[in-house]
Amino acid sequence: MSQRASAPDVAAPCAPGLPEPALAAEATERILKPLARLMIDHGLQLPSLVELLKKTLVEEAVSSYGLSDKGSSDSRIALLTGVHRKDVKRLRETSVTASVTDTMLPVAASVVARWISEPRFLNADRTPRALARTPRRGVTGEPDFTALVAEVSSDVGARAVLDELERLGVVQPCPNGRVALESSAFVPREGLRESFHFLAASVSDHLSTAVHNLCPQRRGAPMLDQSAFSQDLSAEQAQQLQQQARRLWAEVLQEFLQTATVAEQRSQDSQGERHRVRLGVYFHDSVQAAPPHVKPKAVAKRKSKRKSAQ
């Protein structure tokens, strides 16, 4: 029988508690398994990861755990992280390398987000319209791709954004001077660097949400972090569930982006801290491990056949 479950969504604030290093180590070991596959697949070896881990521990300790009255001495950072004080000093003195992420990527993603969420750029059935590349190629009063880009950024030209989206396989030029969106989500087919960018952004934010909810000193309600699962499925049924998940996400994505567009407009004149949000979804399908001490059915059948043949 299939099972379904979701993480509890507790509304009440969490009372301060003690750290749980054993439970954290158990969870970290499981989290590190896909990270290990990523390292092996792309030639990142242990010494490089150790240096990255030291650097990240020091930076996070300085930025998030510094004391306003005591500062963040090398000795205190070493005590918090377990990184040797000499390494702490070296890493704090090393300039932080600037990110090499292409500045075009956020603009391109924002253009697609507005394209699939803003009613002016949608057909009657809420699918993205094919847009004229420039006002000159379109009909008076109709939105065009140049206007779409201008609504997102005044720093990047529409031609550059269009070239990038074409390179990534997200849009397709039409013979009538228009451009059509190939997908209702920004999923580059060929942009490896872009895919790594989204991996880092999405997984980092998701993990940050879970870490926030488990913080011993957390105040206030937890952030949304829920999931559902089903097991004992055939390969065909698992594929059908994935297709349904994609359809549901397309609907949720469009509705959320429409709401987010309005929220951004209403926030333009507000004072105080600025917030960023991310809503994500993932679907994971893998071969289910057999329970301990239970032999696979196929093996049991072969043994029974051998017994009957004797």
Image (cartoon, grey):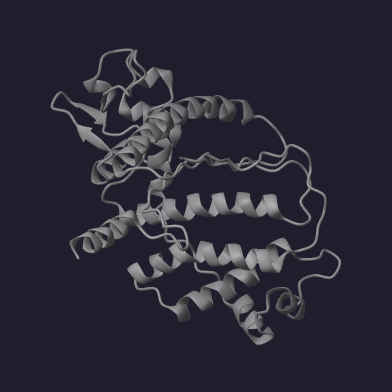
Q: Which residue is painted at 72% across and 55% down in the image? A: 215
Q: Using residue 49 as the reference point, say whether residue 174 is left or right of it.
A: left
Q: Residue furthest left?
A: 175
- Quadrant in the picture for residue 272: top right
| Residue at screen point 46% across, 41% down | 230
Q: Residue at x 25, y 63 (%)?
A: 307
User: Nearest the camera: 95 or 84?
Assistant: 84
Task: Pinpoint residue 270: horizontal percent, then vertical percent.
Answer: 69, 31
In the displayed structure, 301 sits above or below 4; it is below
Task: State the residue lying farthest toward the bottom.
Answer: 86
Q: In the rendered view of the protein, which quadrant contains the C terminus? A: bottom left
Q: Is residue 209 above or below residue 177?
A: below
Where residue 42 sits in the image (x, y, percent)?
A: 34, 68
Relative to 124, residue 181 above or below = below
Front position in the image: 286 or 85: 286
Query: Is any atom of residue 294 visible in this view?
Result: yes
Query: In the image, 89: left or right of 207?
Result: right
Task: Name the residue located 52 percent from the left edge and 62 percent from the top edge.
Answer: 31
Tell whether 148 sits left or right of 15: left
**Whether residue 157 is visible:** no
247 or 189: nearer the viewer: 247
The image shows a total of numbered marks equal to 0
Residue 181 falls in which quadrant of the image? top left
53 up-or-down from 197: above or below: below
User: Residue 67: image x %, image y %?
Assistant: 81, 65
Query: Residue 68: x, y in percent?
Result: 82, 63
